[in-house]
Every structure is written in C-alpha cells, then in structure tokens.
Amino acid sequence: MILYHGSKEIVREPKILKAKYNKDFYFGFYCTLYEPQALRWATRITGSGIINQYEYTPDDSLKVLSFSEMTEEWLDFIAACRNGKPHSFDIVEGPMANDTIFNYVEDFIDGRISREAFWELARFKHPTHQICFNTAKALDTLRFIGSKEVSSD
C-alpha cells in the first residue's frame, strides 16, 4: 500500500514528534491514502511543500485501531486524544477531523454543541483519510519511496 505525507521537507526517516497541540489520534506520524489530501497538508501555510511517499507493509503483531467511517466511537476517541489522553495502539486509522470537522469536534468537547448537533453538522462533509503511526515499531512498517516538490497553484 502506498501512503503519502505532506510536509515542508523530505522525510526519509519518519519520527514521532510531540506537537504543541494534541491531534486526532494523539502524537504520531500521520499519512494518508489520498495524494490530494497530502498536497493540502504540504501547502497549507506557505503554498508550497513536499509530498513524501512510503510503502506500508502491515504487521499483524501490531495493535491497530481502524475506523472505517465517522462513528460515535470515532468521535469519543478523537475527543479523548485531543484532550491529551494517550492510548495503547501502535497504529490508528480513520477519517480525519479536517478544519471544518475539527471546529465541530472542539465545540463538542467544550460543550457548546451536543453530540446530536455534531452529527448533523458533520453529516455532509466529503471523506478524508489518515493513518497515524504512534510507536517506533509502527514506523518500521514504512519504507521511504521518494518525494516531490508541490505547490497549491
């Protein structure tokens, strides 16, 4: 399986970096099946960046959590991760709380909207995908293939 990672630099050896803010599936190295989504990640701040490509070989010994769609469990998991609660999975995969969905998740976490209101607002958004490699052992399933410079023009 080929995965993409949008960045400002070439990432031959992925690492798990602690960020200022907690992300959907907590700290990890994030990739996607969708090259256009990686393009948005790479170009979101300056309009240009790098799309890195990896070959992903699943490892049955890893603890993997996969969400095929936005569900109640997905929403609760993202809310917990974004509130700083770590988990024990090596890899987590599923839809992404993009900028619009992220705002709804934040409103839900902060109690500004109900669970029912979240689902009503999130219902008609186009699909997204992310796979987060949360442990060093998970990163061993990735092999760098190459990279290319991209721009949002």
Image (cartoon, helix red, strand yellow):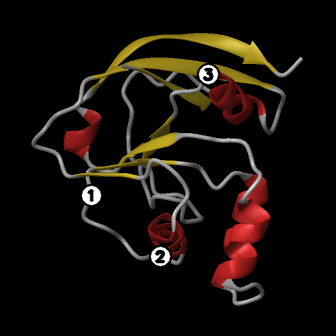
Q: Amino acid at mark 3?
A: Glu
Image height check: is 94 above or below 51? below
Q: Nearer the viewer, residue 70 or 50?
A: 70
Residue 56: percent from the left, percent from the top? 32, 24
Viewer can see residue 8: no
Residue placed at 72% from the left, 58% from the top? 123
What residue occupies the far left of the structure in this picture? 61
Q: Is residue 58 above or below residue 95?
A: above
Element type at marker 1?
Answer: loop
Residue marked by disc 1: 89
Residue named by callout 3: 35
Q: Is residue 140 above or below residue 138?
A: above
* Residue 153 at least partly seen: yes
Q: Earlier in the sequence, mark 1 or mark 2?
A: 2
Counting other residues with Cα less than 10 Å from the Cα at mark 2, is it few (<14), some (14-19), or many (20 or more)?
some
- The mark found on residue 80 in the picture is 2
Residue at point 84%, 28% (across, down): 47
